[in-house]
Image (cartoon, helix red, strand yellow):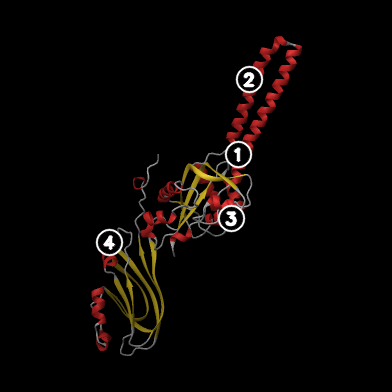
Amino acid sequence: METRDNYKYRRYKYWNNKESKSKSGRFRISKIIARVIIILLIILIIIYNPSYIKQILKILQTSINTISTTLKSTTTYTQPTINSAWVSQFFSIVNQYRQSIGAQPLQYCPWLDEFAYVRFKTMIQNPAISHYSFDQDFNKYLNQYRSFLLISEEVLYPAGYTPNEYVQDLQLNAPIHWEGLIDSNYTYYGYYIRYGPSYVIIGSCPVTEIPGPNINIPQYFKSYGCSVEIENSTWLVIELSNWCSGPETLPVSVINEDLPQQYYMYLPIQYNLPTNDKYVKLVINLSSTSPVKLFLFTPYQFNYFEGLYQREAWSFTGPAYYYGGISTTFNIEILLDTYQLSNEGYYLVISNVLPNARYAYINGNVTIVYTPITPNITLSNTININ
C-alpha cells in the first residue's frame, strides 16, 4: 500500500474567525456606549453644577478603565491557550470516541513530533496549497519505512476552542478530519504547534473544510463564491501512524498456487531493511494438498539446484541455507542474515520434483519479523527555527 495515499486533509475554519471578530465587536460597542454616557453627564454638569466637572471626570475615567480591563480579561479567558496540556486533553477525548467504536487508543510517539515540525516548516512556505509537499517530505525522511509504515496528516486551527468544544466542532463541520482521527489503522500520534500564515474566509461560505491534498485553497473557496485573506493563525499539525517503535511484521508473499508433478516454484526474497539487527526472522506458514519439499537457498545454491537433472533432484537435500524436509505442512521460522538479505537475497523453493509426486495446491503466507530502527528526524537534519 502506498503510504502517501493515506494522509488526511487540511481544514480551514471561517467560523473561528467570525467568533473572534464578534467578540472584538462587542468590546467596541461597550466602549462607545460608555463614552456616550460620559458626554451626556458632562453636558448636564456644565449646565447645572460646573464646580464638580473635574471630580466627576476623574471618577468616570476610572470607571471606563475598569470596564475595559474587565472586558479584556473576559475575552482572554474565553480564548484557551493551545499547548501540550490542551493537546493531551484533546486526544483523551478523541480516545474515548475511539474506544466506543472498538479502535485502539492513540498513543504519543516522539519522532512523530519531529516529522510534524518538518511538515509545518514545509507547508508555511506555500500555504496556498493544501498539505504542500507531503510526498517529498515522506520520501526524504521516511522512505525506507514505506513497506509497512502508514502516515496520516491532520492540519487544524483550534484557537478559541476548549478541547471538548473543538471535538464537537470537528464532528459537525469537518467530518473528513474527524474520521481520520478515529481511524483504527492508526495507533500513534505526534504534533507541532506554531503560529503561521493561513487562509481564512471573510464572511460566510458553504464549504467548511478542504477535501484533499494539493488543492489551491484560494481558488477552491473562490469557486464557491467565498472571499479569503491570509493571516497568522495557530497551527496544530498532527501526524498519525500505525507504528512508533518495536518489532514489525513485513508481508513477503501470500501463496495460492497450483504445483504440478515434477515442477517447483520459487520466491526471490531481497530487502534492505532499516534495522541494526544482524539477523531477522523469516516466518513460513504453508500447507499443501500432497507432500512437497521446502528449501531456502542463497543465489549460488539456487543456481546449483536449477542445474540438477530430475532424478538428482528427487534425492537432493543440499547444499542449502535451510532444508525443511518433505511434508504437507510447514510452520517454521528461519533466521536470515541481514547483509545477505540486502545484497544478494535468498530464494524460497517449494519442490514437487519427487519420485511419487502428485498434483499439489499450495497456500499460505511468508513474512519477515524484525525491529526497525527508530526514525531519526532531528532538528539538525531540518530547517532551523527562526
As shown in the figure, which amino acid type bears the numbered disc 4? Lys
Q: CA distance from mark 2 to mark 3?
A: 49 Å
As shown in the figure, which amino acid type bears the numbered disc 1? Ser
As shown in the figure, which amino acid type bears the numbered disc 3? Pro
Mark 4 Cα within 10 Å, few/some/many (few <14, many 20+)?
Answer: few
Which residue carries the number 3 mark? Answer: 175
Mark 1 or 4: in front is 1
Q: Are marks 1 and 2 in contact (CB under 8 Å)?
A: no
Q: CA distance from mark 1 to mark 2?
A: 27 Å
Give the image location of residue 319, x and y in percent.
23, 77
Along the horizontal axis of the image, is 118 left or right of 71? left
The numbered mark, 2 or 3, whose residue comes first in the sequence reads 2
The numbered mark, 4 or 3, whose residue comes first in the sequence reads 3
Image mark for residue 278: 4
Give the image location of residue 345, x and y in percent.
29, 69
Residue 285 appears in view: yes
Mark 1 Cα within 10 Å, few/some/many (few <14, many 20+)?
Answer: some
Q: Residue furthest right?
A: 48
Which residue carries the number 2 mark? Answer: 62
Image mark for residue 252: none
Q: Residue at x 76, y 12 (%)?
A: 48
Which residue carries the number 1 mark? Answer: 20
The numbered mark, 2 or 4, whose residue comes first in the sequence reads 2
